[in-house]
Image (spheres, helix red, strand yellow):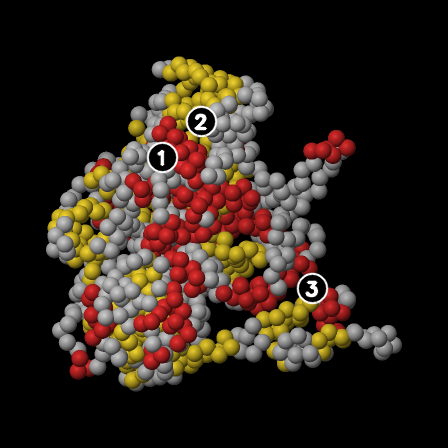
Amino acid sequence: MTTPESTTSARGPVPTALDPSAINVVLATDCGSTTTKAILIEKVDGEFRQTYRGEAPTTVEEPAADVTMGVANSVSEIAELAGRKLIDDDGQVIRPASNGQGCDIYISTSSAGGGLQMMVAGVVREMTAASAKRAALGAGAIVMDTIATNDKRLPHEQIQRIRELRPDMILISGGTDGGTTQHVVQIAEMVAPAKPQPRFGSEYRMPVIFAGNVDARDAISQTFDDSVELSLVENLRPTMERENLSPARDAIHDLFLEHVMAHAPGYDKLISWTDAPIMPTPGAVGNILQQIADQRGVNAVGVDIGGATTDVFSVFEGTFNRTVSANLGMSYSISNVCAEASLPSILRWVPLDMDERELRNRVKNKMIRPTTIPQTLESLLFEQAVAREALRLAYEQHKDFATTLKGVQQQRTVGDTFSQQSSGQTIVNNMTLDLLVASGGVLSHAPRMSQTAAMLVDAFQPEGITTLAKDSIFMMPHLGVLSQVHPTAALQVFERDCLVYLGTCIAPAGIGKAGKPCFSYQITGEGINESGEVGFGEMRLLPMADGVTAQAVIEPSRGFDVGEGSGKRVEREIRGGTVGVILDGRGRPLELPEDRDACRQAVIAWNQVQGLAELN
Amino acid sequence: MSQAYTPGLKVTPWTRHRIRRILPIPGEVKKTVGEAVSATDVVAETFMPGNVTPVNVANMLSMPPGDIPECMIKQIGDTVEVDEPLAETKGIFGFFKANCRSRTAGTIETISEVTGQVIIRGAPLPVQVSAYVAGKVVEVIADEGVVIESDVAFVQGIFGIGGETVGPVTMACESPDQELTPERITGEMAGAVVVGGGRMTGPAVRRALEIGCAAVVSGGLDDADLREILGYDLGVAITGSETIGLSLVVTEGFGEIAMAARTHQLLGELAGREASVNGTTQIRAGVMRPEIVIPRGDDEVTAAGDPDRVAGLLEVGTSVRVIRDPYFGLLGTVTGLPSEPQALGSESRARVLNVETTSGETVTVPRANVELIEE
């Protein structure tokens, strides 16, 4: 067996001659804000499988204040379960694996300490500033604010805002290469005197990345003094028609490790332990989703709903986008979901009568005591209703953000007169969405899988034929970083152990009259032979086990579309899952009855069909 | 497993309290080690760099940015007053000159040849840090601030709004379940830390504002009232910067809920004492809860509480409060801690505990849904 060679660079240890064939045992951790999750991946009968997992509280705050303690605790849990010694007496991860001890590589992601928080700036909000935001989000950051010359704030207001923020780093972009330098220098001239203070201590020099017009580099360098650590990288928008986000994202990852992580307790040690650069957790999730979509040639959406934030990732036609809805979550931010969505919108999804005043107080009590869990069915159904609205809003924000490049000049002919589309259209298309993956407490820990599927379908409203899945134990971050060093292992584990397939949702787009035919179906395959007709407003659930595939023939009625156009028949292979095949004739966009009683009756009927809860 | 860790809110008649009072940027420390300070004493002071105002002189004079340095009347480092000319064009044969005047007072910080923009920095802004709690300075952190130590009664609330304030403790409700209504707040309570009982009503808070109370402390608050007081619906529990005119501390939670009897009794015993109150709440990693801190005299240091006791262990016999429906607010004693997860009414499986209530009834609740009553 050969030992993977690694060298240390600004980004930590880089596996220079890592031989994938020499890797049989992988140890991976994700250091979250509250929990550190470790998994063990082993080669079993020639295939990589996730075999054991362990978790322990993250230890970045006093009294421990050393992230590696939480890592060691979570790894010890695996060691106990697997009967495999992974940490030696000196507290080091044992490598390489030999005699049933140790692992071949150790990798990690991190979002502890609030993750990576950035401020971005660009010249025009919809163009370079939007590209800068995409680069920051794609690298796994939380974008605290976006400054642009047209963000409707006066210059002194912008400067005041920069002074108030305490980001981990700043990304400035603006101008196309060879174009005017004046506007982007003007942005820098506002950032420089504001002297933004970093989150960590006064000895820390604020990292500023400039990824704008290359001709402005000298002027930008002169604008900032020694109080900042300025990095110059390739323009992220070299021309209006092209985005080049990778150099900026790489610089963000480098600085994340060099500065942000280096100031977090115990990270210098953790960096020395790992065989690949530590990645921000959401960046790693985006990585694996992108790889899956590329490999299978599908369009995919992933969501991770947490207590404070909701992350949405999408890959459509090979283009990756990520958004973080900073104040949409199920505990810390639950009250904000209610404020943004409104309580009546949430109550649409509840099949029971509830007192509004009491609910409002309950929501606030959850906000101030975020670790409590629903004890009663009523409480659970309300939280799942809140989740539907949080997901819906997060997806709306994602759709607004994931657009074609704005500011691109288009050539049009006379033939385009009636079908003109401006630049900046969303690229998220629910009709072409193939795979929808769920993760995060309220989705992962729902007592019934059917509840997870229902929340996904109601919130995302997939159209046509869509496979639904959930991340079994939130393994996507680990696999995202593994895919950097061993893509095959990452993809094998993703397919076999990471995803729990819930089934397939078939939902025509279009609106009809209640009870009138929406579509007919014929599904034939191993152990399944079903056919019938679904009326508008109806739902049906066909059991179809995980691992089973079947041929589905869908014939939509006139005015309904399952992917081939109005009334056009579609034939496709579909896969089963723990829930089965959801036949959704409620139409798209999904509209619930406005009358509260009628709405409740409809929700009760859908609840019954899908077996969501036993309502008395 | 017979015990688990569940933190609760701290309510103690005596504890040795240390606070760091630090400037946001380096400055001058006004106190020395051993000095006694009152809550309102300034312990450190500094000046923040003044606000920055950009002026695009090139645009205002319709000149190319590169020509701006030549047109500047004021140079880097010069002071400028409001309406004073900053720059002037050369005009034609000395006539038809155009000038650009400053809209703000300050010092010229930069003049850009690239953008034609001039940055004016306003006068430095004074920043003072007060002691907030009376006590003794035990440490001076050079150029940054001090550490103050005092023996205090300490009450942690669950949620608050508004920042730091100081005033005498004044009881407005005789029992912990009595609702705090406007008629209980009288004119003599101006500047006081008013202690209610159960829910504080919206009209009571308005009355406290009219009278000029320093703070209101009570068991519960309705979300609808909070919205009316703030003027908006609070989305996330990060507070402290509100400027509504007083600070609020809710000790138990939202809705109709009585203040814990111990808390009410303790505050009642200390009526008339000066209390330092901070409504700042931050429910995120590094949680901050609102607090009521009441310094006690040296002669009062009693065996009322052991400040070094390790708290937070949940075991049979400990007192707890249920913090989630359907038993929200219920107080009782832990009678059992089954180790295996159990199915809840919601069908989820979770680790639970059995609680015997003060009325003798036993209920089962998830461990995540109780908090310890720290004594």
Residue that label 2 marks = A538
Q: Split into 4 quadrants, where in the image is the N terminus of chain A?
A: top left
- Residue at figure coordinates x 66%, y 74% from the top left: B103
Which-is-in-front pick, marks 2 and 1?
Answer: 2
Query: Where's residue A184, x and y in %?
Result: 64, 58
Q: CA distance from mark 3 to mark 2?
A: 65 Å
Residue that label 1 marks = A451
* Residue type, label 2: Glu
- Determine the secondary structure under disc 3: loop
Query: Where's residue A37, x and y in %?
Result: 31, 44
Which-is-in-front pick, marks 1 and 3?
Answer: 1
* Residue B65 drawn above or below residue A510: below
* Disc on res. B114: 3
- Determine the secondary structure under disc 1: helix
* Residue A337 drawn above or below residue B10: above
Q: Say whether residue B315 is visible.
A: no
